[in-house]
Image: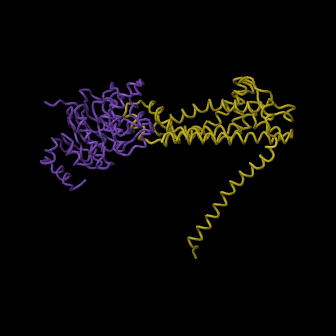
Chain colours: A yellow, B purple
Amino acid sequence: MRTSPKVEQKFIQVVLYAFTSIAIITLIFILAVIFKNGIPQLSLEFLTRNPADMGREGGILSTIVATISLTFIALLVATPLGVGTAIYLTEYTVESRVTRIIRFGAECLAGIPSIIFGLFGFILFVNKLGFGWSILSGGLTLAFMVLPTIIRTSEEAIKAVPHAYRLVSFSLGSTRWQSVTRVVLPSALPGIVTGVILSIGRSIGETAVVIFTAGSALRMPTSLFSSSRTMAVHFYILAKEGVSMPKAYGTAAVLVISILIINIVTYYLMEKYIRRKS
Amino acid sequence: MKQVAIRVENLSHFYGNHQSLKKINLEIYRNEILGIIGPAKSGKSTFLACLNRLNDLIPGSRVEGRILVDGEDIYSPEVDVVALRRKLGIVFATPVPLPLTIYENIVYGVRLLGRNNRKELDWIVEDSLEKAGLWNEVKDRLHTSALKLSGGQQQRLCIARVLALKPEYIMLDEPTSGLDPISTMKIEDSLRTLKKDYTIILVTNNTKQAARVADRTAFFLMGELVEIDETPVVFTRPADKRTEDYLLGRFG
């Protein structure tokens, strides 16, 4: 006997609803644990003072500075490289074996575990190029880690720009580069920015790469060549070595809240940008 | 004596193995409106794309024969394609305003040349919109998005955008196919005025439109030029049976 379409419909709905709930509940659970334990630790002092006594005392200022610098360098390097690659793949080549190989390469790069990137950065930047454990080594390694994400999202965003815009631009006497910079990129910007935001999130939260390449010094970094500890690494060390769970939760709360703020602000700005355009 | 502006000699065009134009020979006179009619897929749009080399952008596109624009072979290696496209402006069937303001749409091509003088741009915007018959409708909202205009206004914007380039030729590819009769009439009026200063090539699905505005009419069928003559001649005494059948609505 066949189940009636109505029953089937209801059943599928319930199952899919349950699946979705599991994802949302997990998120809520994580946030609840972190905020419950972390928020009480937060104070102006926690944000504006350097860690003392291995992180048992004081705040996390130096790790905030380190996180921002590392992420900034990673994005400064990865964004032009990634967007440039995406422009090349979509606008300057015809779909062929070569583009498929490049794209496959980028996909593979995306699948490499971050600890392997850490090792690669350690060998290349820390040792071979002699940058040592530093913000520079860490930032460059993170850049290569997030590169595939930026390439992929930029490529999708650029492909979504109507072909007619390019045709019109060419017909009005633009060169290929002019049509890219004046029409294609502005239209693709929201998509490209989404990729960059995802990458910021990944860079901020990354530990394996950073431990291998930027080290874990607690001092306030003073130059690109300072070894330094990011918030994520700080959390890892505090928690794993049992230094101070309260401080670890405080750090985690700051991490999570910053990522939330970045996401919300960006979506707000993009919304405004899109509305202004249309 | 009419002056030949464009001479097309034995023009064939291929997309990969498919031949889309078959040995076209025709002349276009200065300051005339040449209407090109014919059913879908007869090569009309491809013909326009060959004239300003937009077909270069399509992979697998290939041309044989010659096109002389003002005596210059436009497929010779030393031709400046960008300059050619400014000289032969094109308006497409679907109006495509760029996602910019009305003002920035008009000056898009001018800015590409690095000309950014505000006064000059202001003047070009007013002049082009005036000629395209759109100035009075949009003069108070030049700095709002062009995407908010109606279809007919968008199409006149596209014509104004081409005029801003100071082209010598205006090619229109079924410019009124998506428009209501009143918008269509406004565009046809603009074309009659523009004829004084420009040579116009008008591809149209609507044979009546060719009858209304074209000085001469060419009939394309399956990549072939069946006939070309003064519009009244083509419409009343066509030389070819196929033209007559098409005009009488027996096919297409």
Query: Residue A110 or B206: which is nearer the viewer?
Result: B206
Picture mark count = 0
Please indicate whether residue A22 sits to the left or right of residue B222 in the image.
right
Looking at the picture, does residue B111 appear above or below residue A193?
above
- Residue B85: image quadrant is top left
Q: Quadrant of the N terminus of chain A?
A: bottom right
Q: Is residue B114 visible?
A: no
Looking at the picture, does residue A135 appear above or below residue A86?
above
Give the percent coordinates (x, y) of residue A206. 71, 38
Which residue lies most toward the bottom here? A1
Looking at the picture, does residue A236 appear above or below residue B81?
below
- Residue A49: image quadrant is top right
Give the percent coordinates (x, y) of residue B188. 26, 42
Q: Is residue B226 visible?
A: yes
Residue drawn at x 61%, y 37% as measured from the top left: A196
Please indicate whether residue A223 sits to the left or right of residue B206 in the image.
right
